[in-house]
Amino acid sequence: MRAPAPKFADNDGVIETARSALGNRLFDAVERVGEVQLHVTRDGLVDTMVALRDTPGLEYQQLMEIAGVDYPERDERFEVVYCLLSLTRNHRLHVHVRTDEERPVPSVTGIWPVAGWLEREVYDMYGVLFDGNPDLRRILTDYGFRGHPQRKDFPLTGYVELRYSEEAKRVVYEPVELAQDFRTFDFMSPWEGAKYVLPGDEKAGGAEPEAKGAPSPVTAEEQKKADDAKVEPKATEPKTTERPEQTGAGKDDPGNQPKDKPKDPDVVPTKQGGQDE
């Protein structure tokens, strides 16, 4: 294998061939990031797909995927994207159709039966209707689900949450209840110059933790009391080992004999006199 992934054919002549085959059904054609996008009219979608499948030089035999995109600022807010594959030409193509919440998109299940489930996914996630789909119902969300999750105006928390109830012995739905209040988040990173002082940083710059709004429960007054209560070490000089004789090497009693061990009144000696039990 010469390459880690198969190489697709180039896009030379694809847009020109599509323009001549589709006519006025095609109102825009662009090439972006190495892929060809055909924007076609909604009413002419089925004839467009048949032409893309049967026209020599195009021959897109397989429908690989149907995706949805939501643009709330548009009058026709939804864009349905059909991903086609030509096996004979080793080439991929995207066909875009625009619609809204009310006007349905013609179903392509008569051309590719696999579109049945793919159109159900777009309907479930975005609410796009497909005229001619024999079984247009939800496929990814639960029974009785409210709304369409992939719409930009759908709340991230949803409307209901489910749990198993020991009392009812079944799964029950309840309104969403957040355990933590999102309004207390400041979204500031301490690595990017946050305005508050983290616990411990006051030792370096002389600043004190903020009493209100700080991410730590330690207040400035508590921190000051803790600093005042610090006990100075009793050692007058640091303990160092600079010569071998300071380690007890060569002595008859270097301090590791049983009689040299501390007598701990809380430890009960064993019969052998040790304190390891």
Image: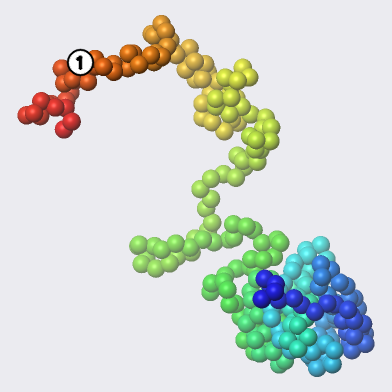
* Image position of 50 (left or right of 118): right
**Can residue 128 be seen at all in this image of the molecule?**
no
Specify the amino acid type for callout 1: Asp
Q: Is residue 53 above or below residue 69?
A: below
Rendering coords of residue 108 (x, y %): 73, 87
**Which residue is disc 1 drawn over?**
252
Rendering coords of residue 63 (x, y %): 71, 84
- Residue drawn at the location 63% of the way across and 19% of the way down: 205
Rendering coords of residue 218 (x, y %): 51, 26
Rendering coords of residue 252 (x, y %): 20, 15
Which type of secondary structure does the marked residue at label 1 adopt? loop
Q: Residue furthest top?
A: 236
- Residue drawn at the location 76% of the way across and 83% of the way down: 90
| Quarter in which the C terminus is drawn | top left
Q: Is residue 85 above or below residue 186?
A: below
- Residue drawn at the location 71% of the way across and 62% of the way down: 152
Q: Residue furthest front?
A: 250
Q: Residue furthest left?
A: 271
Of 114 and 248, nearer the camera is 248
Crowding around mark 1 (Cα neighbors within 10 Å: few <14, some 14 to 19, many 20+) is few
User: In terms of image quadrants, where is residue 125?
Assistant: bottom right
* Image position of 124 (left or right of 228): right
- Residue drawn at the location 76% of the way across and 89% of the way down: 88
| Quarter in which the N terminus is drawn | bottom right
**Can residue 175 be seen at all in this image of the molecule?**
yes
User: In terms of image quadrants, where is residue 21?
Assistant: bottom right
